[in-house]
Amino acid sequence: MTSTCTGPVAVVTNLQDPTADLVIAELYDRGVPVVRFDAGDFPATLSCSARIGGSTREWEGSLRTPTRLAGLGSVRSLYYRRPSAFAFPHFDPQDARVAAAQARYGLGGVLVSLPGCLYVNHPNRIGDAEYKPAGLAAAAACGFHVPPTLLTNDPDEARRFIKAHGQVIHKPISMPTYLIDGVAQTVPVTKVSAEEIGDSVAGTMHLFQQRIDKVSDVRVTVIGEQVFAVRIDCDLLDWRVDYSTHTYTAIAVPERVERAVFAYLAHFRLVFGAFDFALTGPEHADDSWVWIECNPSGQWAWMEPPTGLPMTAALADLLQRGAP
């Protein structure tokens, strides 16, 4: 595709991000300049200077890495993936907290207010959409079939919900990095019975949801105006725990479900979303699609080789085009 934009695409992510690697390679092949950095590299190998005020109505200045320099006003699009946290190990704990706050609201504040920039996705919108209760409410309002769900820290409420709905699962509401022997772990969805609910439930919020009798799972990845749906067939309650058992098939999305998908993205002002559905019947039937969640920074690249869906190209198209 062609674009009138000449500025760089900024990619904000950690060094170990193979999904970003694919997109950057595609942009390089097209001759599109890219500036990649990890916010966690600040201030060691990333610096920023930004000016505004007086006759200056938008941020002027630059971002600098050891090999790249990007003017703040020239960034055509910003691909916000999975940057690492700010860290100041050379400071004492209290000073490190203060420095991290200045970095988050200073550098972070500049990055979320670049002039004329397309965000995929905007960091603040990602933050809004990562609240599971907000996602559940938006999904219900957009017309998705949402399983009966309870959020609570009341053990008695949890037991009553489980008894009322029979088969129930427990799932994390949010999951920070959880390491075992230095390896990040996936915390799986698990089945739960009323007898397993103890007083420890009162210690924090929990999410309980009626278990769906599914025939398969579906991951729907929306990139701009393009929709890519992949049926995931396996025998697991939570398909994320073992990818070796899966088969993948590209499928079509029913029109009503597609309308709801775009309504959901518009609600949170997102241009990218990775939606998960449980399929309870024929894939062409609207009522077979049960909404599970939408990840505004979800993974997608591993599904491209077995299906042939051009998701890398679609994302590169979006970033290359920039803001309307």
Image (cartoon, grey):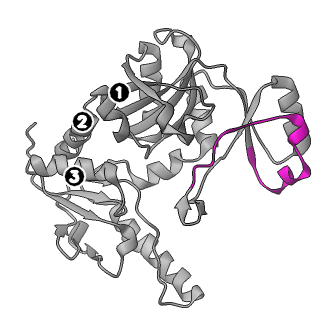
Q: Which residue is mark 3?
A: 24
Q: Is residue 175 above or below residue 208?
A: below
Mark nearer the N terminus (1 vs 3): 3
* Residue 217 percent coordinates (x, y): 52, 25
Return the residue found at the far front.
Answer: 244
- Report how far apart the C-alphas of labels 2 and 3 lie in the structure: 13 Å
Check disc 1: other Cα within 10 Å, few if <14, some if 14-19, many if 20+: many
Based on the displayed image, in which of its 4 quarters is residue 12 positioned? Answer: bottom left
> Pointer 1 and pointer 3: residues touching (CB < 8 Å)?
no
The three-letter amino acid code for the residue at tag 3 is Ile
Q: In percent of the image, x 66 and y 39: which residue is there?
A: 189
- Report how far apart the C-alphas of labels 1 and 2 lie in the structure: 10 Å
Boundaries of the magenta span: 185-206
Please tell me the numbered disc located at residue 228: 1
> Pointer 1 and pointer 2: residues touching (CB < 8 Å)?
yes
Tell whether position 97 is magenta: no
Q: Is residue 95 left or right of residue 121?
A: right
The three-letter amino acid code for the residue at tag 1 is Phe
Based on the displayed image, in which of its 4 quarters is residue 111 positioned? Answer: bottom left
Q: Which residue is mark 2?
A: 314
Q: Is residue 102 left or right of residue 5?
A: right
Camera-side residue: 14 or 1?
14
Q: In percent of the image, x 45 and y 54: which residue is there?
A: 124
Q: Is residue 157 visible?
A: no
Q: Is residue 137 left or right of residue 57?
A: right
Mark nearer the N terminus (1 vs 2): 1
Q: Is residue 234 visible?
A: yes
Front tag of 2 and 3: 3
Q: In percent of the image, x 27 and y 28: which residue is there?
A: 308
Dot 1 falls on a residue whose secondary structure is: strand
